[in-house]
Image: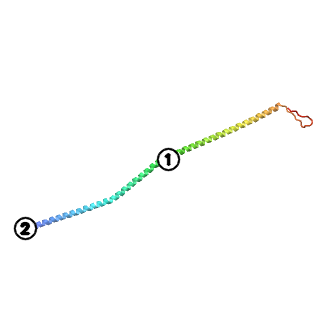
Amino acid sequence: MARANAEREAKDAEVSSRQQIAERERDLALRQAQLKAETDKAQAEADSAGPLARAAKKREIAVIEQEAAEAKAALTERELDSTVRKPADAARYQREQEAEAAKAESIRRAEAEAERTRLDAEAQAQATVARAEAQARATAARRRRRPRHRRPRSRRGRGRARRR
């Protein structure tokens, strides 16, 4: 019996040992399955995060490209202002000023010509008046120097008038 007890105890110990091994193997398998599930989940998240991350990165790049395009457009606009519009405005302003100066000069010349013409006409009028007055004085003086001859009223009767 001792031997039977020893065999039974040995079998119980073996069974107990096998149970413990089985439990540990089961715990190990559960733990491995749990780790695999977590790994698979992490991998799935990583796999799905990849396209999401790529899409987010593409959106960021698109926003940056849009900002760069806007900055380039603003720069082009400023360059256009400084190289085309401002010089064109300055040239237009210069042409306007030159035209205004030419107009003022033309008006000044026309006014001077009108004044010259008026003064010439006035001088000519005064000269004409002076000549007429001088001629009238000369005529009056000649008349005063010569005696007046009476002409006969008719041809008959008195002879001919003398000529001088």
Q: Residue at x 17, y 64 (%)?
A: 21
Distance between mark 2 and mark 1 Cα atoms: 116 Å
The three-letter code of the residue at mark 2 reads Arg
Q: Residue at x 11, y 66 (%)?
A: 10
Task: Say which mark, if any, is on residue 136.
Answer: none
Q: Position of residue 134 (x, y in %)?
A: 76, 33
Contact (Cβ within 8 Å) of mark 2 with mark 1: no
Residue underneath mark 1: 84
Label whose residue precedes the other's in the sequence (2 or 1):
2
Rendered image coloring scheme: rainbow
Query: In the image, 130: left or right of 3?
Result: right
Task: Give the image quarter of residue 121.
Answer: top right
Give the SS element for disc 2. Answer: helix
Give the SS element for disc 1. Answer: helix
Q: Nearer the viewer, residue 1 or 146?
A: 146
- Crowding near pointer 1: few (<14 within 10 Å), some, many (20+)? few
Q: Position of residue 33 (x, y in %)?
A: 24, 63
Whether 62 is drawn above or below 7: the answer is: above
Task: Give the image quarter of residue 1.
Answer: bottom left
Query: In the image, 119: left or right of 66?
Result: right
The three-letter code of the residue at mark 1 reads Val
Q: Position of residue 158 (x, y in %)?
A: 92, 35
Query: In the image, 71: left or right of 131?
Result: left
- Crowding near pointer 2: few (<14 within 10 Å), some, many (20+)? few
The quarter in which the C terminus is drawn is: top right
Q: Position of residue 49 (x, y in %)?
A: 33, 59
Query: In the image, 3: left or right of 139?
Result: left
Which mark is in front, 2 or 1? 1
Residue underneath mark 2: 3
